[in-house]
Amino acid sequence: MRKLAALAAVVTMSVGTLTACSGGGDYCGELKNYAEAVKNADLKDKASVDKLQGEAKKLSKSAPDDLKDDYKVVLDYIENAKKADGDTGKLTELNKKDGEKMGTASSAIGKHAKDTCKVTVEGS
């Protein structure tokens, strides 16, 4: 269960709670929807993962070019979480395998959100 909590922290780190958004056009506005999806995400719940995946896909399309690779990492992670179908063991293995990559991508996204959109992302 402790490892599952760590997995949830890694995913939450990608967006967390946002405050204030300005500049950056659609991207900054879409961060709010994605943040809400992440905030309410339960990787063991198919509907929750589907919502998170949908918001991440929308956000990745409006993301700046220098974040495209980071969003690919996030989307791949979510896709693999979806394939785990709520299985705690599979989610734990996913975190072991891709957690570090996810953390790096999340940090880059969080830094950009703060610098460009004036958005604070907890955990980044």
Image (cartoon, helix red, strand yellow):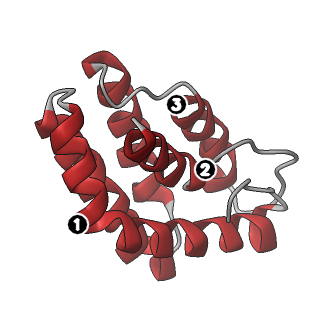
Q: Nearer the observer, disc 1 or disc 2? A: 1
Residue topped by disc 1? 97
Between the residue at mark 1 and the residue at mark 3, the CA separation in whole angstroms equals: 23 Å
Asked if labels 2 and 3 touch by Cβ distance under 8 angstroms, the answer is yes
> What type is the residue that disc 3 sits on?
Ala
Which of the two discs, 1 and 3, sits closer to the camera?
A: 1
Q: Quadrant of the C terminus?
A: bottom right
Residue 37: assigned label:
3
Checking the image for residue 15, the label placed there is 2
Element carrying mark 1: helix
- Percent across and percent down for residue 33 are 59, 34
Q: Which three-letter amino acid code belongs to the residue tagged 1?
A: Lys
Q: Which quadrant of the structure image shows residue 30?
A: top right
Query: Separation of disc 1 and disc 2 at Cα?
Result: 21 Å
The residue carrying pointer 3 sits among few (fewer than 14), some (14 to 19) or many (20 or more) residues within 10 Å by Cα, namely many
Q: Please state which amino acid type lies under the numbered disc 2.
A: Val
